[in-house]
Image (cartoon, helix red, strand yellow):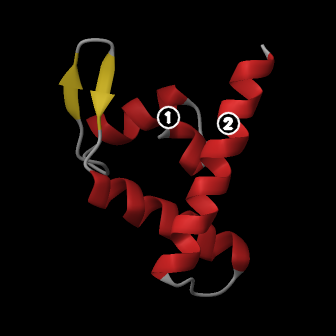
Amino acid sequence: MSWLLGVSPGAVRRMIREGKIEGLRMTGGFRIPRDDALRLSRERIETEAGRKVSDKELARLIDEVITTNEAKLNES
């Protein structure tokens, strides 16, 4: 989730503690509901782009971020 929002994992945990994001504590971390992840991702992307994005465009952008992130992990 932190990489979708462009913040550190600590910042995400702080957002959960402050009630800005719903999070379920699980072994090894938190699980954030898909709706919250999409809402927050949309807010970030629309703020950075300065315009509204369609659901299809949002899904494509998130897929790009996931692909890029996985490629970086595989390089390590």
6 or 60, which is in the foreground? 60
**60 with respect to 37 (left or right):** right
Q: Which residue is drawn at 49% across and 34% down?
A: 11
Q: Residues within 10 Å of mark 2 (few under 14, many from 20)?
A: few
Q: Where is residue 44 in the image (x, y as percent from the top left)?
A: 57, 64
Which residue extends farthest right?
75
Using the image, determine if residue 50 lies above or below residue 65: below
**75 with respect to 39 (left or right):** right
Q: In which quarter of the image is the C terminus?
A: top right
Q: Which amino acid does label 2 sit on?
A: Asn
Residue 39: which quarter of the image? bottom left
Q: Residue at x 67, y 54 (%)?
A: 64
Q: Residue at x 55, y 49 (%)?
A: 5
Q: Do the residues labelled 2 and 1 touch (CB within 8 Å)?
A: no
Q: Which amino acid does label 1 sit on?
A: Ala
Residue 45: which quarter of the image? bottom right
The residue that label 1 is drawn on is 11
**65 with respect to 5 (left or right):** right
Q: What element carries label 2?
A: helix
Q: Distance between the residues labelled 2 and 1?
A: 18 Å
**Numbered badge on residue 19:** none
Q: Where is residue 51 in the image (x, y as percent from the top left)?
A: 64, 87
The residue that label 2 is drawn on is 69
- How many marks do you count on the picture? 2
Q: Position of residue 17 (x, y in %)?
A: 28, 34
Dot placed on the residue nearer the N-terminal end, 2 or 1: 1
Q: How crowded is mark 1: few (under 14 residues within 10 Å), some or many (20 or more)?
A: few
Q: What element carries label 1?
A: helix
In this rendering, the label closer to the viewer, 2 or 1: 2
Using the image, determine if residue 4 lies above or below residue 31: below
